[in-house]
Image (cartoon, rainbow, N blue to C red):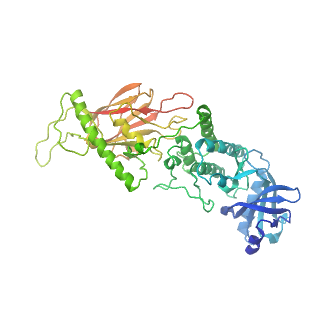
Amino acid sequence: MSSGVHAALVPGGVIGNGRYRLLAKSGADARSNAELWRARDGQLNRDVALTVLLGDLADNEGAARARRTVERAMHASSFTHPGVSRVIDVLTPGTGIRPDEGILGMVVAEWTQGTDLMDLIAEGPLPAGVATRLLEPLGAAIEGAHHAGLVLGADHPQRIRVTSDGRLRLAFPGPRPDAIARDDVKGLGAILYLLLTGRWALPGGPQGVPVAPTGPDGSVVAPNALHPYLPHELSSVAVRSLEDTSVGGIRTSAAILQVLDQIAAEEAETSLIPAVSSSRDDDDQVVWTTQRPRQDKQQKKKLWISVAVLAVATLTVIVWLSVQIVGFFSDEPSKGGGPTVVINQPGSNGQTAPPPVAAGPVQPGQIGVYDVTNQPDNANQASRAVDNNASTFWRTDNYFQQFPAMKPGIGLMASFAEPVKLASVTITSPSKGTHVEIRVASSQDAPLEETKVIGVADLSDGQTQIQLNDHEPTGHVLIWITQLTNSGGGKNQSEIREVLYTRAQ
């Protein structure tokens, strides 16, 4: 039986009681044991799209699954939308299919002129704006179908084609028997991920298509971690659409459409989606992020060299600042490879404790972007917030919605060489209205819920000094942003130019 099946499904073969002549195979969905074909309807003299469900009639389970797929496709025939190819007919053994054809069911849909989705990305990922425009019609179709109580089965890239006027369309309808609306949403996210990265992020993808990389926790790596120029919002919605968790995951196509509409509006205003700088010089400034970027040995070597150079440069500045602000400075060692941090700590082994350290500025040894969603904003700019140069800055990504819509917040985690007790943190920023929390942490990657708030403030345009509550000496201090500055038009973004940490007496 199986050899007969494969002999028939070749270009030029005729199936469906001799009505449909196969022209070219467009793909296969192994999850449904389905082949996707362009064929010629000999009776109506037109091209059609065939979703052919293969199998053995003696396989009761397989036959039942095929019947369920055909039934769902027939129900969907009443739904019309430009983003979905219209179902023309459905066939089953005995009603349009000969029992000896080795076919358990067939969905016939109108043929979609254009090109295969896989051909579109053959030369590489697409720009964010192009991906957004392509995906919107398909997202709208899925949203409309879900409102009608239907599942489309738009979760396989070879079922999608690109129309001649530049939109994605479900060209081969026929949802799996166990598919639910959530699978359409995940499919939409996976297609967006594919457009942005050229990689497929769901199980059962086509052979030969690269699989999306995953992090240590098994979650899919965000598109902008692979291509930093991608907008954070678009990258985030792709990843969150794939997540099964109720917290942080996107579970409706309407949520995806909202982001796509906002990005389309943004592009209409600017004629392009701004890219995040990814120059080699910026890469060298990465010190630390909560989710560490992948680096090869040469990059790591450059990283530590840059840290050492930065430390030596800041040592001189620290001494000068101490003289200007405090009027005196404590004894410094004549040599050292990192910033000097004098800690008020009791002696050991019966030795007399060193004299108390005067209040004054203290420089962190490391600073990095702290992010709980594996998508740190501009991680390569974090060191600019403590470089004693107010003309440089670290800036968040631009968010179309305020926190916690896309993530609970974003922050900068400073790590000191030794535990330090702070009296205040002064932030220089033009981002008036940004709400920040100063938190102490046990480590640089401590969970947010294990950190403790010791100060809060809304930033002014200029310098904002935040007086801190009494706390135990700590080696890690987090500036946690929970509300960004809104400049209108769906632009929520904040900037930090300098942070000054002042030690308590």
Q: Position of residue 258 (x, y in %)?
A: 62, 38
Q: On the rendered structure, is 331 left or right of 306?
A: left
State whether residue 179 appears in this view.
Answer: no
Q: Which residue is drawn at 35% across and 48% down?
A: 303
User: Which residue is most to the right?
Assistant: 43
Q: On the rendered structure, is 430 left or right of 307?
A: right
Q: Where is residue 89 in the image (x, y as percent from the top left)?
A: 82, 56
Q: Position of residue 75 (x, y in %)?
A: 78, 52
State whether residue 379 appears in this view.
Answer: yes
Nearer the observer, 463 or 96:
463
From the viewer's perspective, is residue 196 above or below residue 2? above
Q: Where is residue 327 in the image (x, y as percent from the top left)?
A: 19, 27
Q: On the rendered structure, is 305 left or right of 460?
A: left
User: Which residue is most to the top?
Assistant: 461
Nearer the observer, 171 or 349:
171
Image mark count: 0
Q: On the rendered structure, is 29 left or right of 338?
A: right
Q: Quadrant of the C terminus?
A: top left
Nearer the observer, 146 or 208:
208
Q: Residue at x 80, y 56 (%)?
A: 48
Q: In which quarter of the image is the N terminus?
A: bottom right
